[in-house]
Amino acid sequence: MTYASTRGTVSGVQFSEAVLKGIAPDGGLFIPEEPVRFDSLEIATMSEMNYKDLAKTIFSRYATDFTEEELDTCVEHAYGSESAFPETVAPLSFVTDTLSVLELWHGPTSAFKDMALQILPEFMSVALKKHPREDGKARQIAILTATSGDTGKAALEGFKDVDGIRIMVFYPENGVSEMQKYQMITQEGSNVRVMAVRGNFDDAQTGVKKIFTDDALNQEFNARGFELSSANSINIGRLLPQIVYYYYAYFTLVRNEKVKLGTKVNFVVPTGNFGNILACYYAMKSGLPVNRIICATNDNCVVSDFINTGTYDANRPFNLTISPAMDILVSSNLERLLYHASGENVKMIGKIMDELKTAGVYSVDRKTLANISTVFWADSGTETETMETIRSVYKEDQYLIDPHTAVGLNVYDKYVISTGDMTQAVAVSTASPFKFNKSVLQAVSEDTLKEMTEFEMLTVLSEKTGCAIPTPLTGLDQKPVLHSGVCDVEKMRDAVSDFLK
Ligand SMILES: *Cc1c(COP(=O)(O)O)cnc(C)c1O
């Protein structure tokens, strides 16, 4: 298997190279050059596997330059007995007769990004060894990230103590929640550093981008043996692990006699940067029996509008919502879907991505849109609807969900009302309700909330609902603070330089 760019000028790239590069040199995203297809016999065999074996089987078709032993090690480190995950990794909760919820938040940071960020560093570490530097020096990657909260922590947990990699995370000093801050400043690991920035998220993000584009600085780091890299969600090494849990969820349904092997099901995915839902599409293309993929967005409904109209228009206000991980105007992974749905029309992709950059808007032709509409159905949920969904699902089904998951379930209701389709459905749950405990507590609580810290709310929510607080979130405020550094935006480059000594 090799990888090519969605923009058409790069091809024949090995998986390990694509993982190290992240983005293709022409600005496009890496896509598999050969279709992967599991036949019904293979699917029957896969249906009996545990999560780790299933992951290895799927990876072996995409990461063909990794040996079996290498894949084994990667998977064992990420999802094995030493990991934070339970043995099932991604358990399914049967909420109603026709609807199950796939819980992707049993990893070390209690949110879905762990599913991919626990294994991407393992892929990178193997890839580094396959591509040594020409001058014979040990190759080292330095991951730099600015975070508005959750991604930074998930990256830190994934990259901590991984061979050949260091990671530095910047967060806005007053722009993250108390719990998010504690998750980061108590971060352990010999290769990590966390620094607060005096400014907002955009300032921190701009600061990081400046470091990435500073040629002289990059040369200096290079001379010290370091290459800067990011770990964002367009990396093919983040997409691949997400395919696995769609198969796993389906096989869990089969094992519990909710569907017969081969019967199609619907998936509902709360969507932001389109990574999670694209993995569902890849699962379907490779043989998973899928009927409809339901795309759920919040008030930042640029993607669902696109699926319904064929026009992607980022010229609109940016809304801060209670499902912040889906607050987005430019949804990067959509480019991969456009590539497949347009019949691999790389010229068109290059053109519309230019239009997006310069004008903030593009439209696709009717055929491409029709190809998308036969698979995807999309709508959005408002803030009020999201809160109402948390309340009603808790009351009627005794199941506690976070705001991101609630957006998905709200849109699923709309889907059923609009189409009458009662096909077995799996809704993807992307965060533990305890991770966004303020909104969740507000939704399920009859009495008005008194002044409480987020840490107190954890206990109150747990007592009220009888649900256990996830281990990664307990005792956080008692852990030793290991990262107390604060810097100005202008000093971020010095902070990185100091870290990469
Ligand atoms: C990142 C994230 C999403 C959005 O996933 P995409 O792959 O970006 O579409 C949804 N919910 C949570 C909790 C997330 O962290």
Image (cartoon, rainbow, N blue to C red):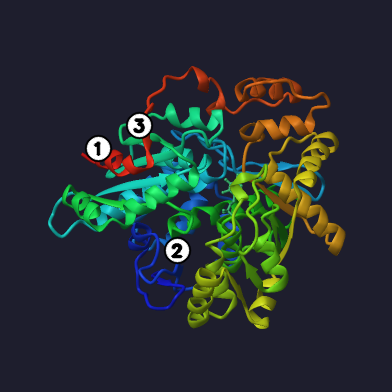
Hey, what amino acid is under mark 1?
Asp
**What count of labels does the image hold?**
3
Q: Which mark is residue 144?
A: none
Residue 124, visible in the rendered structure: yes
**Position in image of residue 476 (x %, y %):** 51, 23
Hey, what amino acid is under mark 2?
Arg
Residue closer to the observer: 372 or 487: 487
Foreground disc of the pair 3, 1: 1
Residue neighbourhood size for the residue with mark 1, other residues' Cα within 10 Å, grouped as few (<14), some (14–19), many (≥20): few
* Residue at x 55%, y 49% (from the top left corner): 49
Residue closer to the observer: 468 or 36: 468
Answer left or right for 4 relative to 407. Answer: left
Q: Is mark 1 within 8 Å of ligand 1?
A: no
**Which residue is denoted by mark 2 in the rendering?**
61
Hey, what amino acid is under mark 3?
Gly
**Which residue is denoted by mark 3 in the rendering?**
189
**Position in image of residue 174 (x %, y %):** 51, 33
Q: Is mark 2 within 8 Å of ligand 1?
A: no
Residue closer to the observer: 329 or 295: 329
Q: CA distance from mark 3 to mark 1?
A: 17 Å
**Position in image of residue 358 (x %, y %):** 51, 71
**Which residue is denoted by mark 1 in the rendering?**
498
For the N terminus, the quadrant is bottom left
